[in-house]
Image (cartoon, rainbow, N blue to C red):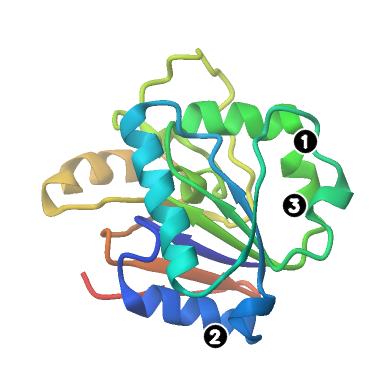
Amino acid sequence: MKLLLTSAGFLNKGVSDIFLQLLNKPVEQISIIFIPTASRTEEEIKYVNKSKQELVNLGIKNITTLNLDHKITADEIKNVDVIYICGGNTFYLLQKIRESCLDRLLLNYDGLYVGVSAGSIVAGPNIEIASPGDENDIGLSDLTGMKLVDFAVAPHYQMEDQAVIDELKNQVDYEIVTLTDNQAVLAENGARKIIGLI
């Protein structure tokens, strides 16, 4: 599996260009599972709609919305080019990923995983980076991420966040990769590359 972990989706054209290069097929043939589950508030849903529109603007027509409100089967994600997980509340998203068994299915998925904000954070070893930006209003106690990558993404990074990031870096045993809204990180075959300028 290749992972394109973004802070704010395809805000930067360079990120969407890499996305299309990775798929290497005509846009009209690209199939996407679009997961908006993390978004519960009106504002979060607004960003979900923006993310979906970015995909439509690229010319992609085969977009299937999948809510993590049931146990996902292998057939639901079989032969799909992209699993695209939107932003929202990271704690709620991780809980729903576990309940739906999506985390287990992703272990055998060989397509492209695209994360936006919370969707990027849950791919890492731990989601504690989501505090204080997200409220753990569901009382999730096990913050272990899906461990699809061995680093944590800190999305929406701005210079004034550095002190908080530095403090967390001193407390954890994994690397933290900060991403501005113009950036993404591509993880492939154990290597990673930052896309976009600060």
Which image quadrant is residue 128 in?
top left
Identify which residue, 53 or 89, lies in the foreground.
53
Residue found at x 43% / y 45%: 48
For the residues labelled 2 and 3, say whether their Cβ atoms are less than 8 Å apart.
no
Identify which residue, 153 or 90, lies in the foreground.
90
Tag 3 residue? 106
Rendered location of residue 172, percent (x, y):
43, 41
Label 3 neighbour load within 10 Å: few <14, some 14-19, many 20+: some
Residue type for callout 2: Gln
Residue type for callout 1: Cys
Q: Taking the image as drawn, is residue 170 in sight?
A: no
Residue type for callout 3: Leu
Mark 3 residue element: helix
Which image quadrant is residue 185 in?
bottom left
Q: Is residue 158 above or below residue 196?
A: above
Tag 1 residue? 101
Earlier along the polypeptide chain: callout 3 or callout 1?
Answer: 1
Q: Taking the image as drawn, is residue 141 in sight?
A: yes
Earlier along the polypeptide chain: callout 2 or callout 3?
Answer: 2
Q: Is residue 131 above or below residue 121?
A: above
Q: CA distance from mark 3 to mark 1?
A: 9 Å
Of discs 2 and 3, which sits in the foreground? 2
Identify which residue, 102 or 130, lies in the foreground.
102
Which image quadrant is residue 177 in?
bottom left
Earlier along the polypeptide chain: callout 2 or callout 1?
Answer: 2
Q: CA distance from mark 2 to mark 3?
A: 22 Å
Label 2 neighbour load within 10 Å: few <14, some 14-19, many 20+: few
Tag 2 residue? 21
Mark 1 residue element: loop
